[in-house]
Amino acid sequence: TIEIPKTVETIGFGAFSGCSSYTNLILNENVLSIGDYAFYGNTALNSIAIRCFTPPTLTSTQTFANTNNCPIYIPLGSLETYRSHPYWGMYGSRYVEYMVFEDKMVEEKALEVYDINRDDMLFNNEISGVTSIGTNFNMPGMTSFDEFQYFTGVTELSTSAFDGNLTLTSVKLPSTITYIGFRAFENCVSLLN
């Protein structure tokens, strides 16, 4: 696996061209542009996971050419943005949406509890079956859980779901919520959204 670190914003022309041994590529959310032929001929790839909600700038159709037609995993909710992009659009049949979490603590807990097939990725079919989060995300140090909006099988927020989380600043509730339990957000003193 090659994981492009969060510090990288640009991947240059032919940067990994012809690298034919690694099987997984992860592009972190700060990648803004990818040069021509950057991953051309990476024939052993089984998956490309992109954590960017906004597609990085591409300047040609050759960036991911000859990459084994492997799936390209993109953040849940970004499919139309990728499909309508001039160069990213050509990979449309390869896209699979998965959950990308802003808060790593939330991501680790969600994978631990809900990753049915243990592939270290959460897909819509895994989260849509969740009917309750209980107090799984009542974790000191957690800062945001905006991805909760995609847990559309949840209709009730449990008692003390986020109670006492002093660092929680943002939670987006699913539109399916009809009941918020006793002390669900009590003492969430940093909550803004």
Image (cartoon, rainbow, N blue to C red):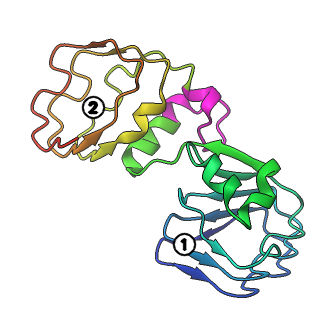
Q: Position of residue 60 (x, y in %)?
A: 77, 77
> Which numbered marker is on residue 171?
none
Residue drawn at x 17%, y 13% as measured from the top left:
182
From this viewpoint, which residue is outermost toward the bottom?
A: 13
Residue 140 lies, in percent from the top left, at 22, 41
Task: In the rendered view, tell whether residue 37 sits above or below residue 44.
Answer: below
Q: Amino acid at mark 2?
A: Asn
User: Crowding at label 1, few (<14), some or many (≥20) Cα neighbours within 10 Å?
Assistant: many
In the rendered view, would you say 98 is above or below 104? Answer: above
At 61% from the left and 53% from the top, the residue drawn is 81
Nearer mark to the viewer, of 2 and 1 = 1
Q: Residue drawn at (64%, 27%), measured in percent from left and top?
A: 125
Left or right side of 46 for 5: left
Q: Which residues are magenta?
A: 112-127
- Which percent across, then down, holds residue 79? 64, 47
Secondary element under disc 1, as helix, strand or loop, is loop
Q: Which residue is mark 1?
A: 31
Q: Which residue is mark 2?
A: 138
Residues at marks 2 and 1, CA–CA distance in whole angstroms: 31 Å
Give the SS element for disc 2. loop
Residue at 79%, 81% in the rendered image: 37
Q: Residues within 10 Å of mark 2 (few under 14, many from 20)?
A: some
183 horizontally vs 44: left or right: left
Mark 2 and 1 residues: CB-CB less than 8 Å, in contact?
no
